[in-house]
């Protein structure tokens, strides 16, 4: 046993020695005052050969960036000016594109699609007309699609998208409670697991 742990310790030490030390890729927010102000990068997602994330600069606000570990590029200024679109929730669709949530002054927070280029980045669909927006919750990838909750005027509904307007649809009928939403989702997507739901929850969702 001692021999095993001694060997394991040796392997871990070797791996630690070979690991690359952290380094600054780039200073994005160079025009900020004071100069120590951060670009506050967050929501990192490794998709294809790049890592996509949201970061803030004084000229763009919080927008979509990407890096290959050597250089950093602004993918697109979704909300021109300094207000920013604050993108997050990046979900890889597995076909070279990904969807995410972002805000614009005209449409509010809605669903967007990108292939990593400015020309290939656009809003998928304005699910909730007006500036209030709909996609405020997390998104989950499954089978080349993304599942998400959309805020509508009267309900919070479960939707699915393949990254196209035609392929973005409400998955379940409108519900008025979290219990109904959970029960209907489980019955539709996980019939075996749904058997563990309480009889009252299933009855309410019917």
Image (cartoon, rainbow, N blue to C red):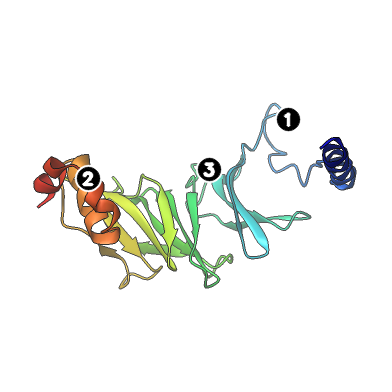
Label 3, label 1: how many angstroms apart (C-alpha)?
17 Å
The correct choice, above or below, for 2 with respect to 145 in the image is above
Mark linked to residue 197: 2
Select label 3 or label 2 by which is in front: 2
Q: Quadrant of residue 76?
A: bottom right
**Between 110 and 15, the one nearer to me in the picture:** 15
Contact (CB < 8 A) between labels 2 and 1?
Answer: no
Task: Estimate the x, y position of residue 33 in percent, counting from the top left.
Answer: 68, 29
Q: Nearer the viewer, residue 132 or 91?
A: 91
| Quarter of the figure with the N terminus | top right
- Tell which of 184 and 97 is nearer to you: 184
Q: Earlier in the sequence, mark 3 or mark 1?
A: 1
Residue 1 in view here:
yes
Whether 130 is drawn above or below 167: the answer is: above
Q: Which residue is tagged 1? A: 35
- Residue 201 is labelled as none
The answer to whether the residues at label 3 and label 2 have Cβ atoms under 8 Å apart is: no
Q: Which residue is mark 3?
A: 82
SS assignment at label 2: loop
Distance in Å between CA atoms under marks 3 and 2:
48 Å
Q: On the picture, is 3 further left or further right than 128? A: right
């Amino acid at each position: 046993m001692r021999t095993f742990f001694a060997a394991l310790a040796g392997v871990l030490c070797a791996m630690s020695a070979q690991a690359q030390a952290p380094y600054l890729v780039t200073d994005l927010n160079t025009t900020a005052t004071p100069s120590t102000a951060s670009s506050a990068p967050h929501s990192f997602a490794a998709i294809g050969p790049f890592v996509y994330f949201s970061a803030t600069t004084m000229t763009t606000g919080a927008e979509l960036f990407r890096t290959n570990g050597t250089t950093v590029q602004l993918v697109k200024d979704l909300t021109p000016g300094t207000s920013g679109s604050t993108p997050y929730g990046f979900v890889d669709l597995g076909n070279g594109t990904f969807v995410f949530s972002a805000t614009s002054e005209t449409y509010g927070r809605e669903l967007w699609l990108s292939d990593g280029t400015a020309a290939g980045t656009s809003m998928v669909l304005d699910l909730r007309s007006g500036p209030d927006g709909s996609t405020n919750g997390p998104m989950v990838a499954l089978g080349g699609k993304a599942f998400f909750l959309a805020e509508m005027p009267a309900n919070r509904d479960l939707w699915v998208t393949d990254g196209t307007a035609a392929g973005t649809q409400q998955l379940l009928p409108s519900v008025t409670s979290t219990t109904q939403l959970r029960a209907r989702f489980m019955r539709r997507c996980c019939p075996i697991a749904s058997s563990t739901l309480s009889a009252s929850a299933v009855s309410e969702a019917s």
